[in-house]
Amino acid sequence: MNSDHLNDTRYKKLLEELIGQRPDEFNQMLQKLINFLAVLEREQYLGAARYERNENRIDYANGFKDKTLNSRTGPIALKVPQVRNGDFYPSCLEKGIRSERALKLSLAEMYVQGVSTRKVKAVTEKLCGTEFSSSTVSRAAKLLDEELDEFRNRPLGRYQFVFLDAHYEKVRHAGTVQSVACLKAIGVNEEGYKEVIGVSVSLSEAEVHWRSFLEKLQKRGLSGVKVFISDDHPGLKKALRTVYPSTPWQRCIFHLAQNAQAYVPKKSMREEIAEAVREIFSCSSKEKAKEKVRETAKEYADRAPEFATWIEENLEEGMVFYDFPKKIWKKIRTVNIVERLHVEIRRRTRVSGLFPNTDSCLRLITAVLQEVHEGWLSSNHRYINIDG
């Protein structure tokens, strides 16, 4: 019987045992599951199961080290598998709790700095299972920040397509509550795999902040970009012209259709106008799309003159995708890839609601994005495949 079959059998047996647990025994269930996965990961690292004779093994098991994990449901006693000679640590313990550690720190900072409400204190205690002293928070934050800084500042290389967008979070700044811009960049490398290549927290989306963000990407080695994809934000457009003046820019067609709503003379025409814009970008070539713009502008010249003028002046910015193979058009003409990240980030940040400072905000968002990034890479799924 091979080791894969043995692992499958053991995993199914464990799941059957766990499913039978009562809700009040959840911690014991989680403890068993994490300990099991950690041992399984050690076996995969060693290249051999427990007591298995295998000439391909690279090291030997060397007992366990006790570790207590303060989870949302209380402390969990774990047994961390050790190896005799190598440097091994189960990724199921480290990666799975990184973003939760960042969230705990964000909440704990609010409590320690005296800016939290009764509700935040209750959430902190429930989430962390314990209270934090300021020195504990400081030490934990330093360790986590070192890891996250390394991710944010890692060297880059050549990326075919880069998607840029931002969302906003509330942060205490200079004694007031402000909305800060969380800038993000998603790159598709030359093999077609997507990566999180940049994240930053700024006071706004002004040109100076986007320019600084792009210059940092450039210094880290970002090159080979065939097109940048983003919404039409004046600050971002100016920054792109300054830092990457010769690289084409694709305006997100989803936002273009939304922007068109501002130029309709009456609400009853909104859906009609949106459909007219969608028809333009459904054309089979750039030449046909341009012709469709002229036809549409002529059609609405009397009924919606502002809309007619607007599409003639703006829609060509959304046609850069036509210069690439047809099979990837849908992938490079919107910033949907980043919009989906916004949903995931907000799902995690809404627990804290208000960050005590920009460092706390950046910490949590980076932790979430690093987790997403590693998930993308481990899935081995190409986002864009021009050659295939």
Image: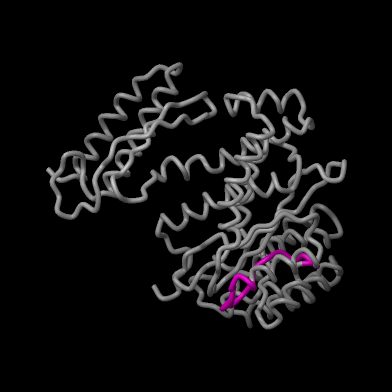
Check the image and report above or below for 152 versus 14. below
Instruction: Using the image as rendered, state which of residue 327 and residue 263 is in the foreground.
Output: 327
**In the drawing, does residue 212 fall left or right of residue 282?**
right
- Residue 56 placed where, x, y %? 18, 55
- Residue 213 placed where, x, y %? 70, 65
**Image quadrant of residue 27?**
top left
Identity of the residue drawn at 64% across and 72% down: 219
Q: Is residue 39 visible?
A: yes
- Residue 175 placed where, x, y %? 87, 41
Q: How many marks?
A: 0
User: Which quadrant of the rendered structure holds the C terminus?
Assistant: bottom left
Instruction: Using the image as rendered, state which of residue 206 and residue 309 is in the foreground.
Output: 206
Instruction: Using the image as rendered, state which of residue 88 and residue 201 is in the foreground.
Output: 88
Identity of the residue drawn at 19% across and 44% down: 3
Part of the protein shown in magenta? 218-235
Q: Is residue 330 visible?
A: no
Identity of the residue drawn at 68% across and 66% down: 230
- Queried whether the magenta region covers residue 328, the answer comes back as no
Identity of the residue drawn at 83% across and 62% down: 263
- Residue 66 placed where, x, y %? 40, 31
User: Which quadrant of the rendered structure holds the N terminus?
Assistant: top left
**In the drawing, does residue 36 fall left or right of residue 323?**
left
